[in-house]
Amino acid sequence: MGCNFPNCPRTTIYEASERDFKVVMVEDAVSGVYGKGIDEIKNIGVKVCATNEFMQVLGNMPPKG
């Protein structure tokens, strides 16, 4: 996946989206993020959130089993 948004993460996000995966980008866990890029990926249906929001959602998920 990588860590520098304009390169690897952006490409991975697009590739996953093209394959109908639900994609979440944890904005503060990726470097090189810029406003236009965030708008761009939101326009293809990517959920963008912060680490604390993502962790809260994970903590509220029911256990599988």
Image (cartoon, grey):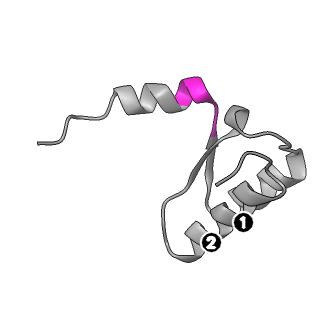
The picture quadrant where one finds residue 12 is: bottom right
Q: Is residue 43 visible?
A: yes
Task: Kindly identify which numbered label has been placed on residue 45.
Answer: none
Residue farthest along the bottom direction in this orientation: 18
Instruction: State the residue at coordinates (73%, 40%).
Output: 30
Q: Are marks 1 and 2 in contact (CB under 8 Å)?
A: yes
| Magenta segment includes 50 | yes
Going by the image, does 3 lie left or right of 50?
A: right
Type of the residue with mark 1: Thr
Q: Tell me the kind of residue under disc 2.
A: Glu
Percent coordinates x, y for residue 35 in the rendering: 87, 46
Residue 29 in which image quadrant: top right
Look at the image and say whether residue 37 sits in the magenta stretch: no
Residue where numbered disc 2 is placed = 15
* Residue that carries the numbered disc 1 in the rendered image: 11
Q: Is residue 44 visible?
A: no
Residue in the image at 30% along x and 34% along y: 61
What range is drawn magenta here? 49-53
Badge 1 element = helix
Residue 50 pos. (x, y %)? 64, 31
Q: Is residue 62 above or below residue 21?
A: above
